[in-house]
Image (spheres, helix red, strand yellow):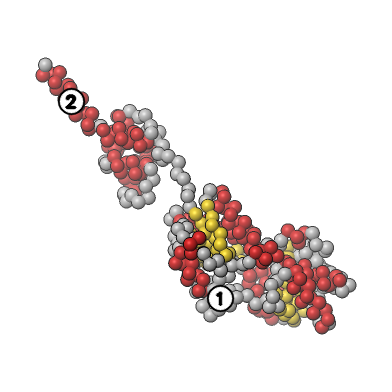
Amino acid sequence: MVKILLKILSHFISFYLDCDILIIIVMLRRKKKWLQLKMLRKAANVSIATVSRVLNEDKTLRVLPETKEKILRVASELNYSLKSKEKKNTFNIGIIQCYTFEQEFRDTYFLSILQGVEKYLRKEKMASTKVRYDDMNMKQVLEGVDGIICIGKFEKKYLDTFSKLSSRIVLLDMDLSPITNVCISLDFDDAMYKVVNYFHSQGHETIGFMGRNEYDEMSLQTISRKKSFIKYCEYLGIKYEIFTTNHEMTGDEGYSVMNRVIEEGKIPSAIFCANDPLAMGAMQALLDAKIKVPEEVSIMGFNDVDACNFTRPTLSTVYAPSSEMGEMGASLLHGMITEEDISYPRRIQLPCQLVIRNSCREN
């Protein structure tokens, strides 16, 4: 009789001792033997709760690396899944655009950056909320976003406003000095060296620059293609002419500026335009004036939009990795949100490459 009571009591005690094991079995949704679970707990010498949090990748848990390693190693040996369920990615990214719908329509450079951002977000199944920088409801629209991507050049007052909406911000197509945020831009300085050096190598003695001054403020400076252009012309001993406009850099404006240059009668043998629409308009003005391209004047644009392949002659240009910039920016922000990337201020510059087509005369 005593033996029977002892046996019942033993089973009763064993049941309560192993209740926590049953809990972990339910959480992991695996049918494992109790002996295997005891081995897992014993190997790490920690509580079942700690084991569960490690297996479920609880990032708030603070545990010694060697302890975590033991748990994961034994779990692997016992063929446990390291996640109790698939994680759902619910990140929502705010995208702030500095340009108007008309600018986006006329010059696809900004659109290409945006497409790169959205390509990465789709791949990672992340949501996005887009607003214009002057949207009156911007604060309400972006409330609660996990991070912000800013596309274009913004004044400091806007950056201060954005920083109150999120501490995780990536700036695209903007170069800061001093560096206060993560910013990605193109290496305009090197691009201008490649342009000027190319025209120099083709024997051009005078080169024109068509564009407008980019945003510049004492506490927020941007690299100016015009300044770099002048610097390298002077370095290589080449004469230059500057044709600027205060209007948007569109095809119509390129046509208008080029007509003004033609009327003045001081047409350089080579002209660099700050974007492709300007170059297309300038080239059309030359052709309408019976000035041959590239026999009399070589034309080069910037960005390498698809339409460059369909102009007559096809337009030489500078390839700007705008879509790649968008993807990289989204990837960096993703890392900042998941804490896989340290959110410290930095500047990243992407190189540009010449794309020589039929609008430039080659010796």
Q: Which is more toward the observer, 13 or 321?
A: 13
- Residue 221's disc is 1
Say which residue appears at 59% left-offset and 67% top-offset: 98
Q: Which is more toward the observer, 38 or 11?
A: 11
Q: Identify which amino acid the numbered label 2 is placed on.
A: Ser
- Closer to the chain start, of discs 2 and 1, is 2
Q: Which is more toward the observer, 229 or 98?
A: 98
Q: Quadrant of the C terminus?
A: bottom right
Tell me residue 147's x, y (percent): 48, 59
Q: Are marks 2 and 1 in contact (CB under 8 Å)?
A: no
Q: What is the residue that sits farthest to the top in this orientation?
A: 1
Regarding residue 171, the answer to whether it shows in the image is no
Say which residue appears at 79% left-offset and 59% top-offset: 310
Say which residue appears at 52% left-offset and 51% top-offset: 126
Q: Secondary structure at mark 1?
A: loop
Q: Quadrant of the N terminus?
A: top left
Spatial separation of the CA atoms under disc 2 and disc 1: 78 Å
Within 10 angstroms of label 1, few (less than 14), some, or many (20 or more) residues?
some
Tell me residue 264's x, y (percent): 82, 83
Q: Identify which amino acid the numbered label 1 is placed on.
A: Gln
Find disc 2 in the rendering and name its residue: 10
